[in-house]
Image (cartoon, helix red, strand yellow):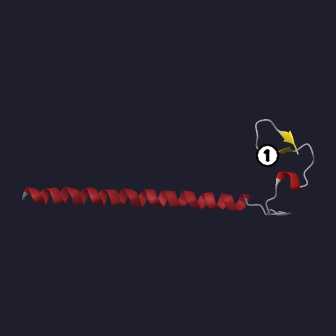
Amino acid sequence: MKPIGIVLLVIAIILVAAMIVLYFLGKKAQKKKEEQDEQMKAAAQTVTMLIIDKKRMKMKDAGLPSQVPCGRTTAPRIC
């Protein structure tokens, strides 16, 4: 056999081996993901949320108690 034929044969064998390994790793990962999905469905909870207001306001106009500091300064000040 010519050297180029041997090189191509070795490359083909390596590629086939890599495909087989990836196939089995993929099957294993798929089983693991299905188990995790089942656990997620079992632990799922329904949450009811009450959204009061979504608009942005200045801190002093928001109607917060006087104990809430204004802004993000290092020394909090009362509005």
Q: Which quadrant holds residue 58?
A: bottom right
Displayed quadrant of residue 6:
bottom left
Local crowd size for mark 1, using a 10 Å CA cut-off: few (<14), some (14–19), many (≥20): some
Residue 78 x/y as whole percent: 88, 42
Q: In the visual, does 68 lie left or right of 25?
A: right
Which residue is at 18% across, 59% downward?
9
Q: Does 2 sit left or right of 67 as displayed?
A: left
- Residue 36 image-quadrant placement: bottom right
Give coordinates of residue 49: x percent, y percent. Answer: 82, 63
- Residue 18 vs 76, above or below: the answer is below
Residue 38: image x %, image y %?
65, 61
Quadrant where the C terminus sits is: top right
Q: Residue at x 79, y 46 (%)?
A: 71
Residue at the top extreme? Answer: 75
Q: Residue at x 35, y 59 (%)?
A: 20
Camera-side residue of 72 and 46: 72
Horizontal relation, residue 64 to residue 14: left or right: right
For image coordinates 73% across by 58% down, the residue present is: 43
- Picture coordinates of residue 41, whole percent (x, y): 69, 62
Return the residue at label 1: 71
Q: Is 28 on the left or on the right of 73, as rendered?
A: left
